Amino acid sequence: MSQDLAILQQKQTSWSNYAVKLHNGEVSLQLQASEQVNRLAALPTTIEQVPGAEEDLKAAKATRTTLNATRKELVDPMTKVLERLMIPEKSLDAPIQKMEHAIIAIKKAEEVKKAQVQLKINEAKEIELHVQNKLAKFDADCKNYIETTCQKAYEYALGEGNITADKHEVYIEQVIDLRGNAQKFADLMPRDTFEPKYHTFEEKSAIVEKFKPTEFNVFADMFKACIISKFLNYDLAVQNKDVALARAQKEAEEQRQQIEREKATAEAMANINVSAQQMEIDPSPTKALKQSFEVDMEETFENAMLILSAFTANVTKCKDKTTTKKWFGFSADSAAKALAKVKSDDNAFAPQGIKFKVVDKL
């Protein structure tokens, strides 16, 4: 403790002596400067006075040089103290930078992970929409097949086939057996062409299985009902074929339009349902990284000219982004920083020839 007190007393004495020296030095500097200011106050007015004025000017410049050297000598101890006092704060620079890099690396990895999760969520929605649209198409294709096939069978019966009223029931059974069996509808099921990037086969299958297609036998029953309906009152139709055919064609067209409307409605509802799904990622316990841009170009004369040219071409956007006050000191580095700030505000900003890199910050 006594040793610390001795050191403290020694420092007090040193600083006290230095304060006296600093005061005396400051007074001396002021006196020397005042003397020269007074000598320079009287400006020459004739050519004869110029030689004396030049001597005064030379002496003032020499005095200024001396004052500068003396001032530096006076503050040198203080400068060294300031440098010593800055050592603790500078000692934090490397650890801070190391810690920042570690945090940024972890956050970037977490962002990549979340991006992958989001991509998988988005793809799951795409799979659902694809399956529902495929089933809507399958449903419409089957119903169109039923309507078209039954209509053709009816037109053939009244036309080229010349099926009489007493034989139309046998004809209907033949058409059902040949054209209306369940396998015909199985053949209409579209192939699954969706290739997932972020889901395994098993994961995709689990999503697909949530949506069941109408069973093939149901469409077979619909086929049977449709053709029986077409041939109702067939004994009257054969007596007035033109009227019967015209009515049947009109009804068939109306049915096809209804099928298309149902398909469009099913697709629209699927899109609405998928879009409305809220599948949120667990929030991060930390703040997201801040991203900005920097010009990423080798320091060459050609690149410096490119950067300055880009600044000039976009001066309206860039001028307010620079802190330059003295424009004669404006540099390619100042221009690069301004361009980077504009790019950070507007990602679409892409001046010709300028390359940027993304910089992550906490």
Image (cartoon, grey):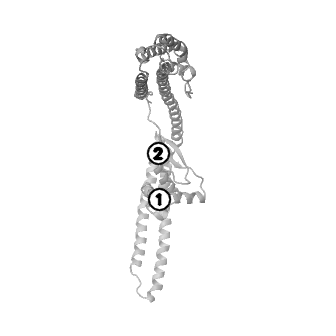
Residue bounds of the magenta highlight: 311-315
Find out whether residue 314 is within the magenta segment.
Answer: yes
- Where residue 5 appears, as percent x and y from the top left, is 45, 43
- Where residue 183 appears, as percent x and y from the top left, is 55, 15
Where is 90 relative to 244, above or below? below
**Amino acid type, residue under disc 1 in the picture:** Val
| Residue at image mark 2 | 6
Q: CA distance from mark 1 to mark 2?
A: 25 Å
| Residue at image mark 1 | 75
Secondary element at image label 2: helix
Where is 67 relative to 116, above or below? below
Query: Is there CB contact under 8 Å for labels 1 and 2?
Result: no
- Where residue 341 appears, as percent x and y from the top left, is 46, 50
Image-quadrant location for residue 266: top left
Front residue of 219 and 272: 219
**Amino acid type, residue under disc 2 in the picture:** Ala
Front residue of 338 and 253: 253
